[in-house]
Image (cartoon, grey):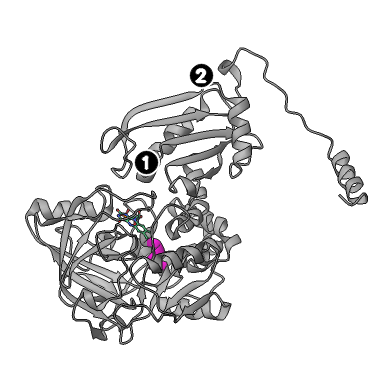
Amino acid sequence: MRSLPPFPDLRAFLGWLEGQGDIATIAAPVSLRHEMTAVQLAALRRGGPALRFTGHDGPAMPVVANLFGTPARVAAGLGLLPEQVPEFGAFLAALRSPAPVEGMRDALARWPMLRAALSARPKVLRHGPVQESELPGLDALPVQTPWPEDAGPLITWPVVITRPQGSAPGDLAHYNLGVYRAQVLAPDRLILRWLAHRGGAAHHRTWARAGEPMPVAIALGADPATLLAAALPLPETVSELGFSGVLRGARTELVPARTVPLMVPARAEAVIEGWVHPGETAPEGPFGDHTGYYNAMEPFPVLRVSVLTCRRDPLYLTTVTGRPPDEPSVIGEVFNDLALPVIRAQIPEVRDLWLPPAACSYRMAVVKIDKRYPGQARRVMMALWGMLPQFSYTKLVIVVDGEIDIRNWDDIAWALATRMDPARDVMLLDRTPMDYLDFASPLEGLAGKLGIDATTKIGTETARDWGREMHLDPTHQARAEALLAGIGR
Ligand SMILES: Cc1cc2nc3c(=O)[nH]c(=O)nc-3n(C[C@H](O)[C@H](O)[C@H](O)COP(=O)(O)O)c2cc1C
């Protein structure tokens, strides 16, 4: 299915982008403090190329930014052309719940699936480029301070690698990879900001309960498949290391870390190794976040760095989170299309689902269903809220049916205006889970949910005759177009 070559590391991907004319070098002086953010966001807003900053005012190391600033580059990071994303989503859905194989011929017909399963097995090497050299400390990295009121330098694209207490370093199926921003406190200390429901936080609780220091590794400048697998809200039972192999179309290559009992990506640009000691936290932030606001200061665990290994000539990958559109919201749009077949496998009546990027990528969902029975819209709302941890933070679900285009606000407004009664068609829930980043919710971590049923009402849902939609004969419409074209309008 993959139509692009495998990208074993970031530089292979950058080389491919170079061939596409989709990366540009900015050699002019640009400050890592705030100014680089403006350049990144301006490039993103105009659908511009990935950027390589060589004239910045930090330690001498090229800074790569806006890597996934367009949906086409996110798809390319998955090895796909944009139009292949839905098909790949269907493939992933089939991988998750394979139908029983019916005979040898059927098994062979499904061989891409078998190949994908095999490529999902990571491979452990003895040496890797990521350990060619070492840096003296975090101050040797060109780390951005993204927003004017930010607390300090922030590592924005770290892939944080953890495993639970009691697991073995070689037990790769138990590893978690997540992108959690990291505030640099000192050359040998940073803060790991994994939110409570994240895989990294769950692992941290196992080490804290045992009263043992936790080994952590952070890959900087990982290959696109690892970056995207770590950013995807995968179910806890799916290993990001294995999944990145499926995305990459080639096995994940790992090497043993130097100073912590963990395996790390062999071809990343750099790896920070270190330990989180029981009970050691520091106030994190404030930093600008994807909500468009600065977060409050909150305590998060501190990582004490034991070594910083890197390639001989490392690149530093960075991004910026802010009010959408930002790079994570562009990634979110592609994930939306990728996730749809998986959602449909669980809730078959879902025809389409859109998480508007402007609503922080997950706080609002519009769902189109194939409506067949009364009350179905409410069932779909509840199924969605319960399906993925990420959907428990979706404050508003709007359900529509028929020919409503859910990516068109005019269509949504029309459905709301004509198919919804505020007293009958609204479902309000109270005290459901919410991330603490939502300061609009009255209690931290607990908030309401709103479901709006804007579908056609059928059966016992209404006692009245429902309106009939008006449509013109398509031949008359075509003739109208031709007539207007004839008078030059
Ligand atoms: C650029 C970027 C920054 C992110 N920052 C954070 C963060 O600071 N804390 C956090 O908990 N999640 C953050 N996320 C979201 C998580 O990485 C994402 O939800 C991931 O799926 C979590 O993986 P997990 O489910 O294995 O924990 C960020 C994502 C991206 C793409």
Q: Quadrant of residue 368?
A: top right
Judged left or right of residue 486, residue 426 is left
Q: Residues within 10 Å of mark 2 (few under 14, many from 20)?
A: few
The residue sitting at 25% across, 63% down in the picture is 152
Q: Residue 303 in magenta?
A: no
The residue sitting at 54% across, 68% down in the picture is 48
Q: Residues within 10 Å of mark 1 (few under 14, many from 20)?
A: many
> Mark 1 or mark 2, which has the lower sequence index?
1
Q: What amino acid does circle 2 point to? A: Arg
Which quarter is ligand 1 in? bottom left
Q: Is residue 429 above or below residue 212?
A: above
Q: Position of residue 431 (x, y in %)?
A: 30, 30
Residue 118 visible somewhere in the drawing: no
Q: Position of residue 304 (x, y in %)?
A: 14, 67
According to the picture, the residue beneath numbered tag 1 turns out to be 393
Q: Is residue 208 above or below residue 251?
A: above
Q: Position of residue 219 (x, y in %)?
A: 29, 70
Q: Position of residue 81 (x, y in %)?
A: 58, 66
Q: Residue 227 in magenta?
A: yes
Residue 452 visible somewhere in the drawing: yes
According to the picture, the residue beneath numbered tag 2 turns out to be 424
Image quadrant occupied by the N terminus: bottom right
Q: CA distance from mark 1 to mark 2?
A: 24 Å
The residue sitting at 52% across, 68% down in the picture is 76
Q: What amino acid does circle 1 point to? A: Tyr
Instruction: Tell me the SS state at disc 2.
Output: loop
Instruction: Tell me the SS state at disc 1.
Output: helix
Judged left or right of residue 75, residue 182 is left
| Prevalent SS, magenta region | helix
Front residue of this view, candidates 38 and 214:
38
Instruction: Specify the farthest residue to the left.
Output: 211
Q: Which stretch is magenta?
A: 225-229
